[in-house]
Amino acid sequence: MNIKEVATRAGLPAKTIRYYEEIGLIAPRRQANGYRVFAETDLHKLAFIGRARSLGFTIDDCRQLLALYDDKDRASADVKRLARAHLAEIGTKIAELRAMQRTLSDLVAACAGDGRPDCPILGGLAAGRG
Amino acid sequence: MNIKEVATRAGLPAKTIRYYEEIGLIAPRRQANGYRVFAETDLHKLAFIGRARSLGFTIDDCRQLLALYDDKDRASADVKRLARAHLAEIGTKIAELRAMQRTLSDLVAACAGDGRPDCPILGGLAAGRG
DNA sequence: TATGGGGCCTCCAGTAACTGGAAGGTCAAC
DNA sequence: GTTGACCTTCCAGTTACTGGAGGCCCCATA
């Protein structure tokens, strides 16, 4: 299948797919005219990458996951370790965002938000409160 | 004060401060020998930027906030609007991360994590479940 | 046979926000 | 006078794409 079809079916932009080829995540064959030909396995890999990316795995994570995916002998523990590490990162990010949320909403609540120039938000940012 | 001192006091790397000058967020004066000289107002601005950045504001947000900060006549409503928009973004990001967290922890829980190759995590990523 | 419109190709440049490193000038102390 | 810390600029790299230019290729229709 051509790039447009695989793009539609994998739910990724064609440009992104070319980029994935460039960085070696996939290696579609070529027709005589230079057009890429995608096999079903390419489609599967692309769907896999797209899904992992949307779950916040980095490209490098994807590379490792694909290697595990391709390796029929790897232990599920290897995959689980990767997923757990990523889960921990997600937890940290959520905690950080929550802290930001608290600070900012306190500042927003304290601000009159009217036509007067007094604003505790700017003061709070300047002073490092929260 | 020199860049190292302002860096220490603002809690930012010197390199970052040079970068902030390059993109026009600050404009320290120079000594005859070319060294940057930072005034107290520069320090305040840098601390302000560092704080806003750590709360997830983009550099562009910072530019706007600095302009509001410098403008004694602006209404606090302007600042509040910016902060609220940012708060909404934070909320969205947290929701997205929570969704990832749920999906991933379900997959991790379903995985035996032993020496056998069976792994629902890879299957889940491939199939787009969750 | 010409032409029009899509689809495909490569290559270049840009994004956000730094970060690292090389090459070299400056300054204070010993 | 020579360390060693500190300062300077400039260049390149990071992540994961995205946009655009310029130019084939293919098919259908007039």
Image (tube, coloured by chain):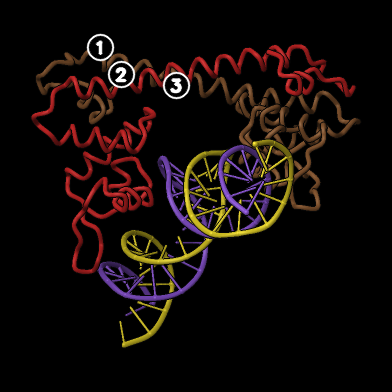
Chain colours: A red, B brown, C yellow, D purple
The residue under label 2 is which amino acid type?
Arg
What element does badge 3 sit on? helix
Q: Which residue is mark 3?
A: B97
State the quadrant of the C terminus of chain B. Answer: top left
From the top left corner, tell me how far across and down residue A45 is, in percent: 23, 40
Q: CA distance from mark 3 to mark 1?
A: 18 Å
The residue under label 3 is which amino acid type?
Leu
The residue under label 1 is which amino acid type?
Ala
Q: CA distance from mark 2 to mark 3?
A: 15 Å
Name the residue located 35 percent from the left edge and 23 percent from the top edge. A86
Name the residue located 67 percent from the left edge and 33 percent from the top edge. B7
Chain at tag 2 = A
Q: Which residue is mark 2?
A: A84
Q: Which residue is mark 1?
A: B109
What element does badge 1 sit on? helix
Q: Does the CB distance between marks 2 and 1 fall below 8 Å?
A: no
User: In terms of sequence position, does the residue under pointer 3 or pointer 1 come before the other?
Assistant: 3
Name the residue located 33 percent from the left edge and 18 percent from the top edge. B103
- Report the front residue among A40 and A83: A83
Residue D3 sits above or below residue B108 on the image: below
Chain at tag 3 = B
Have a look at marks 2 and 1 and say if they share a chain: no
Have a look at marks 3 and 1 and say if they share a chain: yes
Within 10 angstroms of label 2, few (less than 14), some, or many (20 or more) residues?
A: some
- Report the front residue among B66 and C30: C30
- Report the front residue among A91 and B85: A91
Chain at tag 1 = B
